[in-house]
Image (spheres, grey):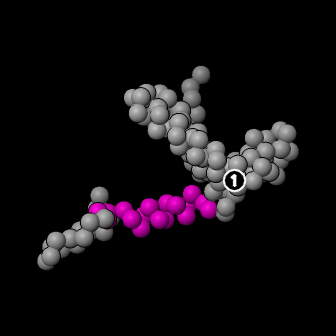
Amino acid sequence: MPETRVTLEAIYDLILTRRGADPQQSYVSSMIHKGEDAILQKIGEECCEVVIAAKNGEKGASIHELADLWFHLLLWMGHAGITPADVEEELGRRFGRTGVPPASGAPEPPPNEP
């Protein structure tokens, strides 16, 4: 059976629909009922697991842990009222910036140039 490709936006939308579900039946709802501290703690745990998998050079485990981290970040975003579009807008604002000021007299890079 082929795997389905899922977007972050689709996962976010699903999270929003499950917020009001029965906490006994929905992981999303149970985490939201536990509160922000529980969600943020889970994000911290997932961050550590990503680092450990990456440090161990385990690509498969890294992908698995990144998926867990992204899911929990989306869960917190839904709880906090932050949308993927909000984050995409911020990334778009940053795209093409080096973060390093140009040398004296050097021209600024054109916008949206990686």
Q: Which residue is at the front of the view, 2 or 75?
A: 75
| Amino acid type, callout 1 | Asp
From this viewpoint, is residue 85 visible? Answer: yes
Residue 37 falls within the magenta-colored stretch: no
Against 52, residue 110 (above or below) is below
Q: Quadrant of the N terminus?
A: top right
**Helix, strand or loop at mark 1:** helix
**Residue 70, position in %: x, y?**
56, 45
**Residue 49, position in %: x, y?**
53, 36
Residue carrying label 1: 37
Q: Quadrant of the C terminus?
A: bottom left
State which region is magenta: 82-98
Q: Residue at x 39, y 65 (%)?
A: 94
Q: Residue at x 64, y 51 (%)?
A: 40
Q: Which residue is situated farthest in the bottom direction here?
A: 105
**Residue 23, position in %: x, y?**
83, 44
